[in-house]
Amino acid sequence: MSWDDFAKHARDAADWGANYHKTIRDRPVRAQTAPGDIAAQLAPSPPEDGTDLGAIMADFERIVMPGITHWQHPRFFAYFNSNAAPASVLAEFLTSIIAPQCMLWQTSPAATEMETKMLDWLRQGLGLPDGYQGVIQDSASSATLAAVLNMRERALNFRGNIEGLHGQPTLRIYCSDQVHSSIDRAIWIAGIGSDNLVKIRTTGDLRAMDPLDLEAAIAEDKLAGRVPAGIIAATGATGMGACDDLQAVAAVAKEHNLYTHLDAAWAGTAMICPEFRTLWAGAEQFDSIVFNPHKWLGAQFDCAAHFLRDPDVLRQTLAIRPEYLKTHGAEDIIDYSEWSIPLGRRFRALKLWFLMRHYGMEGLRVRIRNHVMWSQALCERLRAEPEIEVVTNPILSLWTFKVAGTSDDDTQALVDRINDDGRIYLTQTNVDGTKVIRFQAGQFDCEQRDFDVAFDTILELARAT
């Protein structure tokens, strides 16, 4: 393909993309294909000769699109949205064209310096103090893994990377019983072992971990000769939005000199609205914090903002400096590959620059406030219906419900009917051992009318049993 041909096809793709988003409400939210449907249409072996791009695009429409669940659909109310605001998409397009590898300052100075500045813009937007510095990770999962590795190395006086874990004392990490599964996976990968992730029971409407139980677990481990290494707290956990009492957690951590990490992957975006910051009061006392601009803020996947009070701990844990990665003759530069697990790094800061400049922080706040208002209003409309039981009250735009008096099997059957219907997309979770239906709003372009469709769809299909 020549670059002249590329320009033509790129214009066609842009037109296709605009039409896709303008007509997306006409599509079922979740893919309606059966397992194997897409694979059966793909050739069993690669082609020997090239194919005209027009034919490839036709096959894209015929084969690929029926098997796509539309994460950009305004009635995607299932998982936390992976958004793609138009300004962010344009930035990603430009990034794809120039295709930089941004592992070092010298391999793309603009990427490094923009990343530093964009993370500081976000820090200011969230109301975090000046001391925090930031790095863009691919996901909150990677940031959490980095935090767990920090906890491990700090507790072992940075001997783990050198000596290995065999023969080292048993390390313990503490979290609530509401945390995301990425915490469990980080514990596995870090070599600490799932038996040493201590999950503290949660209480209250916010399902916060009990600080007395946390204190007791740490004391018991110390008495048994185990080494407490860190605490992972949550603001807006995935299941039903659980929020820990961060001030209480930070107080326990300070008493025992433990590293603290806050997973605010979804709810962190809402903290650009000052009125929601009560949900993470005390966050400024944590050693590291992560939230995903690729969820609620509108940045295209992938983009996780990882803030650190002391980046030197992270660099001491992750940095490797062979000669070919050194930048000679430049002082006080940042090489973000020393702040992340992969060596290779994409130019993720550009989409944040486009996003925040185009919409402005107030434009982004308005969207979040609307999502919270519309979601909570839908909750109250459904609560007023006699057959609907709201199980957990809204935390921002997330809440759970079920049809009153029904079994777990009945609840799952209703979720399946709703998703097969195609008008909206929901998912299920467990609350206190009971299966419930989870509603969450955050698609960048959703409107009040989409919540009206959700109300009608839920009631119609709940009453069809």
Image (spheres, grey):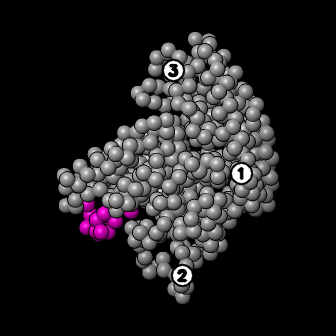
Q: Secondary structure at mark 3?
A: helix
Q: Earlier in the sequence, mark 1 or mark 3?
A: 1
Give the residue at mark 2: 332
Q: Is 462 drawn above or below residue 128 in the view shown?
A: above
Residue drawn at (44%, 42%) of the image: 208
Q: Residue 130: where, in percent of width, then height?
A: 57, 68
Residue on which the image places disc 3: 411
Rendering coords of residue 429 (x, y %): 49, 31
Q: Quadrant of the C terminus?
A: top right
Q: Position of residue 437 (x, y in %)?
A: 54, 27
**Image: magenta residue range:** 150-165
Quadrant housing residue 358: bottom right
Residue 335 visible, this angle: yes
Q: Closer to the N terminus: mark 2 or mark 1? A: 2
Q: Tell me how far mark 2 sits from mark 3, CA to CA.
A: 57 Å
Residue that badge 1 annotates: 364
